[in-house]
Image (cartoon, helix red, strand yellow):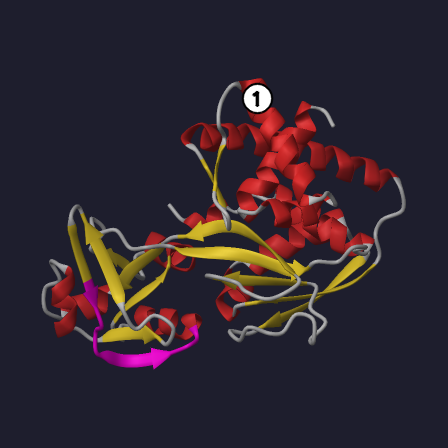
Amino acid sequence: MDSADDMILLAEVAETGSFTQAGLQVGMPKSTVSQRIAQLESRLGLRLLNRSTRHVSLTEAGQVYLDYCRRVRTEAMAAAIAMGNLREQPVGTLRITCPEVTAIHFMPGFLQSFAMAYPRISIELIATNRNLDLIKERIDFAFRVGAVTGQDLIVRRLSSIRRMLVAAPSYLEASPPLREPKDLLLHRCLIHDAQPEWVFIGGEMRHALRPPAAMKSDVISFLFQSAVAGGGIALLPAYVCEPALKFRGLIELLPAWEITPYEMMLAFPALKNPSRAQSAFRDHVAGFDFSALRGA
């Protein structure tokens, strides 16, 4: 294994937070993964990982080095895809699940780029806010928000998802002033079932509020459309709001306050012999730029 392979291996360890999971990704025993990373640290003369009995995390030096490792991995995967395209294209059907809002606002462009690269692979997209049993439901890949648990699953972090507080100009014109988080208690708030508590951080100040729900739903697109219609204030993913913000259909509120982002994860069964279609999708995800989810 050369230095480039070691850099790719470090990227897998950093993103899975586990020598074991990284080993599953690359088909290598945990002990070998740990040894290769230790040798890499020795060559560099720097400690890249903090190790505990259950988890590994990046040191400051490791975080800097990870950016270079990801570039090497992206180039290696791009080269592998290019060579693979010289052979017969992968064929098959992939069953993919994701939240409803992701299906509407992100997946069309993402899946179109995949379809252009792999035109002989068909996609069955299951948009649901429920966490399906991937094995039982024969799901190849699941895009999920937040922590993902389950046996025999490989989990990759894809991106943070910036959130913002928004309302329509028509609502704000007829409502009390909103200068700080506690003022929300005087407003009509559009609440997502999974996030009844809204947390705002400004310097050393932290406000955790449970605004009374003028409307409540588990469908973010409904809350978004309700906000655009002037129904109240909503806490929504920034990438969903950006088109409406551009044309002043919505206005961002309390922008000086920090709101904890979501985390978008990809989960898929830990198969020893994935199909060529599954491998193609994993490669596409690894090389895709998910910065749109982070928002402006």
Quadrant of the drawing holding the N terminus: top right
Q: Is residue 225 left or right of residue 290?
A: left
Residue 108 position within the rendered picture, expressed as x and y whole percent measured from the top left: 60, 59
Quadrant of the drawing holding the C terminus: top left
Q: Is residue 239 left or right of residue 211?
A: right
**Can you tell which quarter of the image residue 77 is in?**
top right
Between residue 230 and residue 66, name the one nearer to us: 66
Q: Is residue 115 left or right of residue 99?
A: right
Between residue 207 and residue 220, name the one nearer to us: 207
Between residue 123 and residue 10, name the one nearer to us: 10
- Residue at far front of view: 53
Q: What is the magenta range? A: 208-219
Q: Is residue 11 above or below residue 218?
A: above
| 10 Å crowding of disc 1: few (<14), some (14-19), many (20+) | few
Q: Is residue 238 magenta?
A: no
> Total of numbered circles in the picture?
1
Residue 197 position within the rendered picture, expressed as x and y whole percent measured from the top left: 27, 69
- Which residue is rendered at x = 65% and y = 56% of the image? 111
Q: Secondary structure at mark 1?
A: helix
- Which residue is rendered at x = 47% and y = 44% of the image? 52
Q: Is residue 106 above or below residue 31?
A: below
Residue 38 position within the rendered picture, expressed as x and y whole percent measured from the top left: 59, 29
- Which residue is rendered at x = 58% and y = 57% of the image? 266
Q: Amino acid at mark 1?
A: Ser
Residue 86 position within the rendered picture, expressed as x and y whole percent measured from the top left: 87, 38
Q: Which residue is mark 1?
A: 42
